[in-house]
Amino acid sequence: MKQASCFLSTYAADVSGVCSALFELGGMTVMHDASGCNSTYSTHDEPRWYDCNSMVYVSALTETDAVLGGDETLIQEVAEAAARLSPQFIALAGTPIPMITGTDFPAVAEILERRTGILSFGFPTNSMNSYLSGAGMAFRALAERMVDRAAVKTAELSANILGFTPLDFSVNGSAESIRKRLEAGGFRVISSWAMGSSLEEIRRAGRASVNLVVSSSGLPAARRLRELFHTPYVVGIPYGERFSEMVVSDLKTAAYTGRSRVSYAAEPAPRQPETAVIGESVAAGSLARAVCAETGESAQVLCPLETCPEIFPPGGAEAPSEEDLAESLKPFKTVIADPLYRPVCPKDCRFVPLPHEAFSGRIFRKEIPNLTADFGAFLNMLSTK
Amino acid sequence: MLKSLSGRPDVPQVCVPVGSAPFPVPFASGLEYVPPARGVWNIVHVGMLIPEAHQIFVCAPGCLRGVVLTAAEMNASDRFSTVAIRESDVLEGGMESLIIEGVTDILNRLPSRPPAVLVFTSCIQHFMGCDLPLVYRTLRARFPGTAFADCYMTPILRKSGLTPDEMMRRQLYSLLEKRPLNSRSVSLIGNCFPTDESSELVRLIRESGFDLKDITLCKTYAEYQKMAESFLAISCCPAARAGGDALEKRLSQKHRYLPLSYSYREIEQNLHRLSGALGVPERDYSSAVSRAEAALRKARKVIGGCPVALDAAATPRPLSLSRLLCEHGFSVERIYADGFSPEEKADFEWLRKNRPEIRLYPVSRPEMRVLPRRTPGKTLAVGQKAAYFTGSNYFVNVVEGGGMYGFDGICRMAKKMTDAFLHEKDARSLIQMKGLGCDGCR
């Protein structure tokens, strides 16, 4: 059965994606749920929880409110908390029971905004989609409502980086390294969504000449910014010297031509590769391309998460279930994946661990590499394992 | 009720002196914050106490995430599987089939068939009116050699009857199969930790020639099943009380609720009730009382007037412990709790009368997220949440009473407080580990 997992973990959910995307921006995010989502998020999905006082709460929905219709309770309690804590904005995100009872989150947000005077978002998440979907909604909402529409493009090359959350990049300096790599390539970074940037920086995002999309969650915002500001985007993460140069070159080309592109899609699909990379489309696609650029060895991407044709790596395959994945992995001699994928890999394959916070949470956090700063170490591991 | 004490006008602070606090819920409900103190066991940790049992959760992926990673952090992924609910399952129905076929698929794919399976359903099945009796009938017919326990991850019902924690501790014993009762066998039920062998409770049972059974001591499923023969089931934790009542009803075991307490009188009453249930003479505990008094005096001498903060996750009876400490000269200044058990009413009244200035802080109120986590000087914390909110590295790392019971438990607590006062710990690392004391927890 496709939905049954004997051995595997599960990815962070959309509701966590919303919280993670907005965490650093001074807002108040409320998961509309009984309990549990908040604990899961703060324990497994949010490495910044201990050190950063971001206002992320759960509404503590009760059976009575769900049965009798308690939207007014939710609105009142959020409004009261907002009055005391003065957040920059309010975000509501749904979970399974509000989906069943048909909570209209955009409508609730609109009422809240009128009542509090604080800009409010309502995200119809339901904990049944992955973090990419939730973070994507949140980033798109920022593009829609936070970015200054009167922005004037910068004279020099400039970029926003879209799609940062610790779920994909942990807190190991990867976000800073990517930013530095762009700066080294001649770009002024206007904002990075949403690690290491303030809400004020994000408001100025319309000034950028190009956007870099570093995860699937950044794509909806990139598309909206293209509609609003005609800003083209490039999809890819600068891993390794050669592929990083390609990404930077693509950014410059996009800035000058106005045409968007996916950096790791430039090459044709690999033929009968011996290596598989399991992961999120943009990260796995970039990694496969970077490994190929540095070593000449091609790799196939297996994607267990939501994706779309535009950013799907060439020759990649979707693998939404444990059974699909186990079957797809059979021909490969080497598998690069989060350690919790080990039980479904062929017993005799070479397993190269690449922990992914969105899958294994905090368990292997200390072992998550910064592939932008130190791709060489990863290549060494790949060749010597 | 709200009072600004932080000195920062933009950060409202919520606390209330015990002298003017309502009981048993001092704070209004509303949005909730969850502090990063994770030592309290969750339903996965508790379920893993049944040796050799396999857990299968049937929930939305977002709900699965926390439990699947709990199992992974316990290094127990091989005893844990999931069935993910998708939108189409909710919109189109067929929930019963999803559970039945999902569990069947998992059991057919596992390397070996477990003797017991705990199937956890969630709020979704409850709201959809899923026919769970049909599900379990079908599974039991398909897998006659396997025992199935219906378990629940239904936080939305936490204010509608039994809490999820109470249900879990009840269902933990639902797999026990009726067998003839053994008049020399006694079970301690519903605890996460073994009760200390040195406690008067355990000593009374063992020294009277009874065989003591406890799920925390079971190594095999067969050992677990032997708990069914006990003629007496003892619960000490409030959340285990419903489980004891269920055993009395289903297996005809006598249930005695002998709650953890720090009151000499209540401890002695409980031990005498146990003697009565065992049919043995009541013992004299005056020397045990003397030992507790001496231990508290010794601890007070070391700790002196250092402010003490406690939390309600450290022990089911934080007010009883606070009263004991106050009566013995300790400077209890803060108690962190969203609410109290009605069992603590007398201790609350005592504190209200004798130490009205003690500040009650909530744990979950939104303001607790932004409140400065420090105290003016050194604070001795009892419990992980008290340590977190006071920013203290001098803390007793304990949840749910930590297996300490009776006068012996008081001696041990006094010793732990002394040790905590003298030796700094790494609170940041320690309190973030899930399931304190759980085998294999990281």
Image: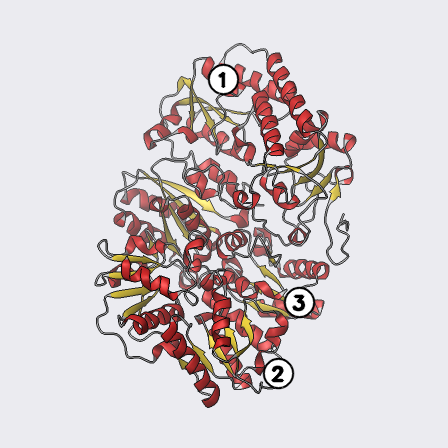
| In the image, residue B326 above or below residue B370 | above
| In the image, residue A280 above or below residue B112 | below
Quarter residue A89 falls in: bottom right
Q: Residue at x 35, y 62 (%)?
A: A378
Q: Residue at x 64, y 31 (%)?
A: B343
Task: Check the residue under mark 1 and report the chain it is in.
Answer: B
Q: Nearer the viewer, residue A175 or A269?
A: A175
Q: Which mark is residue B203?
A: 1
Q: Position of residue B325 (x, y in %)?
A: 68, 28
Whether discs 2 and 1 lie on one chain: the answer is: no
Whether discs 2 and 3 lie on one chain: the answer is: yes
Q: CA distance from mark 2 to mark 3?
A: 19 Å
Q: Which residue is mark 3?
A: A88
Looking at the picture, which amino acid does disc 1 mark?
Arg
Estimate how packed mark 2 is, as few (under 14), some (14 to 19) or many (20 or more) residues with alpha carbons within 10 Å.
some
Secondary structure, mark 2, is loop
Q: Residue at x 65, y 19 (%)?
A: B293
